[in-house]
């Protein structure tokens, strides 16, 4: 047994008192080390408009927005190059690169962006903690079949009638496949979060919110009739029930019963759709669009669902770009009549109009005409809604 002299024992006691007074810890004692902050995880889900078809060449148009132009500074360095955010990681299994720091090029194509870009910038600015965006989206997918979740039940009524018609046309579909794929991708990413988020040291994560941006394929069947029944209208009516069921199942399957969810309004057509529907009740496309937006809103108003929010986006529709789209469509018909080749350089009849069209976007109508500004502002609005949301006590 080690024995200390009276002198050595006094020195030993003095060292203990001094180290206690100064707060000195033994190298082996790390109990006072600050805990690393949990990673804030956001799920970005939907179909092609969550994938993103905003043309990067049109992103500078955001800077001209009278209300939101300052947001472009979050995306650009002072030298004009696009920022790369080391504090925000994005994971998307559909992309070849799978995961990496947030920057431009995380849309469907490498020269495209979706809502993720400005969404990630907003939440990255807000949180000191590292942020992970899990993007899970596929083009051309609906809720009545593709994203149909267990508690929505077996398709009946208009949902079943549409699937039967598609099957008769040779289009066999697997109900709920992309719902299951969505959950699987989220779970896989979270299970391997240490390989995804740089510097992760096992501190855990918090599911901070889900942004849902989808709807075209549930809406665009508005004109379908089967045996005199307006099946398309009924699909829109069923959307609220099917989407509410999906949100309940997402929360259950991810074991996140209080997960905040923001629904991005389908803003294709902007406020013109409302004006058209009011002016002419027989304008079935415009009426169907307004009915669809109300169906989205109804999910957020469902008393059985808490912490689900509807996010208006029609304000962000580029009216000038739509005017150019109409000119482009008319010119396309004229080119066909005259045998003029269709190229990127003559999408509109004059070089000046063509340049303006491409500077603002230049993609399909259902993809917001390719406006990167539109997609970015949708991401901004979704992020702002989830950040305003207060956790339940």
Image (cartoon, helix red, strand yellow):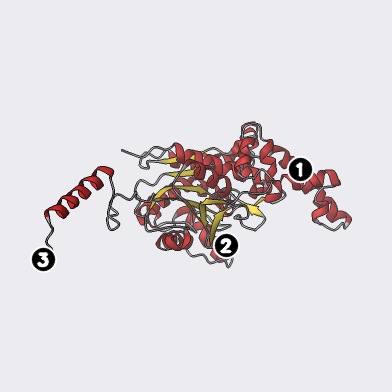
36 left or right, relative to 178? left
SS category of the residue bearing label 1? helix
| Label at residue 324 | 1
| Label at residue 95 | 2
The residue singled out by tag 3 in the image is 1
What whole-number distance in Å separates the C-alpha atoms at marks 1 and 2?
Answer: 31 Å
Check disc 1: other Cα within 10 Å, few if <14, some if 14-19, many if 20+: many
Quadrant location of the C terminus in the rendered image: top left
The tag earlier along the polypeptide, 3 or 2, is 3
Q: Residue furthest right?
A: 338
Q: Nearer the viewer, residue 8 or 21?
A: 8
Q: Identify whether 159 is placed above or below 287.
A: below
Q: Position of residue 301 (x, y in %)?
A: 42, 38
- Kindly identify the residue that appears in the image at 54 percent across and 39 percent down: 381
The tag earlier along the polypeptide, 1 or 3, is 3
Answer yes or no: do the residues labelled 1 and 2 have beta carbons within 8 Å? no
Q: Position of residue 282 (x, y in %)?
A: 63, 38
SS category of the residue bearing label 2? loop
What whole-number distance in Å separates the C-alpha atoms at marks 1 and 3?
Answer: 92 Å
Q: Nearer the viewer, residue 101 or 44?
A: 101
Q: Position of residue 189 (x, y in %)?
A: 45, 61
Report whether residue 150 is seen.
yes
**Residue 64 occupies which quadrant of the picture?**
top right
């Amino acid at each position: 047994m080690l024995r200390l002299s009276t002198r050595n024992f006094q020195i030993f006691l003095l060292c203990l008192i001094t180290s206690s007074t100064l707060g000195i810890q033994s190298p082996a004692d790390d109990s006072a080390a600050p805990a690393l902050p949990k990673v804030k995880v956001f799920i970005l889900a939907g179909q092609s408009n969550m994938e993103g078809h905003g043309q990067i060449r049109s992103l500078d148009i955001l800077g001209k927005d009278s209300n939101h132009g300052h947001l472009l500074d979050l995306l650009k360095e002072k030298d004009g190059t696009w920022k790369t955010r080391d504090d925000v990681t994005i994971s998307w299994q559909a992309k070849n690169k799978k995961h990496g720091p947030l920057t431009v090029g995380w849309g469907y194509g490498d020269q495209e962006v979706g809502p993720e870009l400005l969404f990630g910038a907003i939440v990255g600015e807000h949180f000191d903690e590292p942020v992970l965006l899990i993007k899970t989206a596929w083009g051309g997918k609906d809720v009545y079949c593709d994203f149909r979740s267990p508690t929505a039940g077996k398709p009946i009524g208009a949902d079943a009638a549409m699937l039967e018609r598609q099957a008769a046309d040779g289009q066999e579909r697997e109900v709920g496949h992309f719902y299951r794929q969505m959950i699987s991708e989220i779970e896989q990413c979270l299970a391997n979060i240490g390989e995804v988020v740089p510097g992760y040291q096992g501190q855990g994560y918090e599911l901070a919110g889900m942004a849902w941006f989808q709807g075209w394929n549930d809406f665009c069947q508005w004109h379908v009739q089967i045996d005199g029944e307006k099946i398309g209208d009924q699909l829109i009516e069923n959307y609220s029930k099917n989407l509410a069921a999906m949100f309940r199942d997402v929360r259950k399957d991810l074991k996140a019963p209080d997960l905040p969810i923001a629904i991005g309004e389908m803003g294709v057509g902007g406020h013109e759709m409302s004006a058209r529907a009011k002016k002419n009740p027989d304008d079935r496309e415009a009426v169907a669009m307004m009915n669809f937006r109300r169906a989205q809103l109804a999910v957020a108003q469902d008393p059985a669902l808490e912490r689900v929010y509807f996010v208006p986006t029609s304000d962000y529709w580029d009216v000038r770009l739509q005017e150019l789209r109409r000119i482009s469509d008319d010119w396309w018909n004229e080119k066909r009549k005259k045998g003029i080749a269709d190229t990127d350089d003559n999408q509109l009849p004059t070089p000046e109009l063509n340049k303006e069209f491409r500077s603002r976007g230049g993609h399909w109508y259902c993809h917001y005409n390719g406006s990167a500004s539109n997609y970015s502002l949708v991401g901004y609005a979704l992020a702002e809604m989830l950040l305003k949301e207060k956790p339940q006590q």
